[in-house]
Image: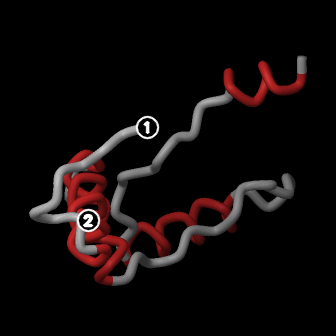
């Protein structure tokens, strides 16, 4: 039963780019709510690599990683045998 529950859970990817203005807006809005402690984690500014990965479709990144693996292991030019 537990294995079924794991399969039914979805992994979500947040593709929104967080800028310095977003962080400042979050801090201002959270400070205005003085009575409630928010369990929401404060956002951090995305670095260059994070921004790039969020803009490129995941299918392209996956295809790149597969092709890179084939090239590194020397499978390019040899027939791929699935067993």
Mark 1 vs mark 2, CA separation in Å:
17 Å
- Element at badge 1? loop
Q: Residue at x 31, y 74 (%)?
A: 73
Please say if 22 is above or below 6.
below
- Element at badge 2? helix
Q: How many marks?
A: 2
Q: Residue at x 31, y 68 (%)?
A: 69
Residue 42: image quadrant is bottom right
Quarter holding the C terminus is top left
Q: Is residue 77 left or right of residue 2?
A: left
- Which residue is nearer to you in this view: 2 or 78? 78
Residue bearing mark 2: 70
Q: Residue at x 68, y 21 (%)?
A: 8
Residue 13 x, y percent position in the rendering:
47, 47
Q: Which mark is residue 83?
A: 1
Q: Is residue 56 left or right of residue 3?
A: left
Q: Is residue 64 left or right of residue 77?
A: right
- Which residue is nearer to you in this view: 47 or 18? 47
Q: Residue at x 85, y 57 (%)?
A: 37
Q: Pointer 2: residues within 10 angstroms few (<14), some, or many (20+)?
A: some
Please say if 5 is above or below 77.
above
Residue 49 x, y percent position in the rendering:
32, 79
């Amino acid at each position: 039963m537990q294995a079924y529950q794991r399969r039914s859970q979805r992994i979500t990817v947040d593709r929104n780019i967080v800028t310095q203005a977003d962080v400042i807006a979050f801090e201002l809005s959270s400070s205005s709510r003085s009575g409630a402690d928010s369990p929401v984690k404060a956002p951090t500014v995305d670095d260059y690599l994070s921004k790039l990965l969020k803009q490129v479709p995941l299918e392209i990144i996956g295809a790149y990683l597969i092709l890179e693996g084939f090239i590194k292991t020397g499978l390019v030019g040899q027939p791929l045998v699935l067993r």
